[in-house]
Image: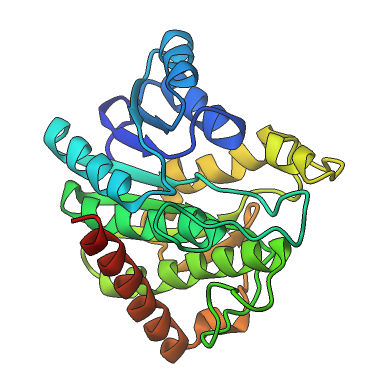
């Protein structure tokens, strides 16, 4: 990897929690940070406090994901690191099913599908050596391809777990696709129940600090010893085994086909 002072790093979901902490540390070390968020006031405060560039999009709308990718492509010649961190938690009401602007189950849309589409659109900018880091979770739930958007048997925990497993499946898939290209792709569970708004809103007592999760995330972004490591899932600082479905190539293909279909339908309906 090039020195951090020469790197451009995009972090989604950077206005609070883990994303903000990681953005602050990378900016402190001299990286050119592109901090994504959806709230204009929070982005303005972030620019003033951290001296970073900001980009705005609501990742619950695939048209805005598309526009975000186009804006970044127009403004930058290359990216060194993409951190897909933005996410929606499992919520305080387990039974309340929500949908994105495109009619897709909200957690699947934001936690997984937005990052999937954004990554694929930005691949031409990720010139070797480059890294993609997907902030997933150890809380993974098998995807039911007969009802992947959970229209019949919904729970917030299950929706969250499916979206996080989908991230890991995409990580393995993309790492295989990019083998030999000098672009690594890894996913991680940064820390369990960090002290974030997402955790507190779910009524859960935090067990770890945001700093704990940031340490593990920054390691995947910056550690020179991980320059050739790709297609792996980490639990904190340690390699770990994801849910068995992530290692099933047929399931990953089905997920890829589902993802491409949902994106195509959403963008075509937008005119």
Q: Quadrant of the N terminus?
A: top left
Q: Residue at x 70, y 48 (%)?
A: 191
On the image, the x and y values in percent for residue 28 come to 46, 18
Q: Residue at x 31, y 74 (%)?
A: 261
Q: How many marks?
A: 0
Q: Is residue 62 above or below residue 158?
A: above
Residue 239 seen from this side: no
Q: Is residue 212 above or below residue 226?
A: above
Going by the picture, which residue comes out furthest to the top? 48
Location of residue 189 (image quadrant): bottom right
Foreground: 235 or 157? 157
- The image's colouring method is rainbow
Q: Is residue 149 above or below residue 86?
A: below
Foreground: 52 or 260? 260
Q: Quadrant of the C terminus?
A: bottom left
Foreground: 88 or 216? 88
Q: Is residue 214 above or below residue 163?
A: above
Residue 183 seen from this side: yes
Q: Residue at x 46, y 63 (%)?
A: 104
Going by the picture, which residue comes out furthest to the right? 205
Going by the picture, which residue comes out furthest to the bottom? 250
On the image, the x and y values in percent for residue 153 come to 69, 77
Q: Residue at x 12, y 35 (%)?
A: 74
On the image, the x and y values in percent for residue 129 come to 25, 50
């Amino acid at each position: 990897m090039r020195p951090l002072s020469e790197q451009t790093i995009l972090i989604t979901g950077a206005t609070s929690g883990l994303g903000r902490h990681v953005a602050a540390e990378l900016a402190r070390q001299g990286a050119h940070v592109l901090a994504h968020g959806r709230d204009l006031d929070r982005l303005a405060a972030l620019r003033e406090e951290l001296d970073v560039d900001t980009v705005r999009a609501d990742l619950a709308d695939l048209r805005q994901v598309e526009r975000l990718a186009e804006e970044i492509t127009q403004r930058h010649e290359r990216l060194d690191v993409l951190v897909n961190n933005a996410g929606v938690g499992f919520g305080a009401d387990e039974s309340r099913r929500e949908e994105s602007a495109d009619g897709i189950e909200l957690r699947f849309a934001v936690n997984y599908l937005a990052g999937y589409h954004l990554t694929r659109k930005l691949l031409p900018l990720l010139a070797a050596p480059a890294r993609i880091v997907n902030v997933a979770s150890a809380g993974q739930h098998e995807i039911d391809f007969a009802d992947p958007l959970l229209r019949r048997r919904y729970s917030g925990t299950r929706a969250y777990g499916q979206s996080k497993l989908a991230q890991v499946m995409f990580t393995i898939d993309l790492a295989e696709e990019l083998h030999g290209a000098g672009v690594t792709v890894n996913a991680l569970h940064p820390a369990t129940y960090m002290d974030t708004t997402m955790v507190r809103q779910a009524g859960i007592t935090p067990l770890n600090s945001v700093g704990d999760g940031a340490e593990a995330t920054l390691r995947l972004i910056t550690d020179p010893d991980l320059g050739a490591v790709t297609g792996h899932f980490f639990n904190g600082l340690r390699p770990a085994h994801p849910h068995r479905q992530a290692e099933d190539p047929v399931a990953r293909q089905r997920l890829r086909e589902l993802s491409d279909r949902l994106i195509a339908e959403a963008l075509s309906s937008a005119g």
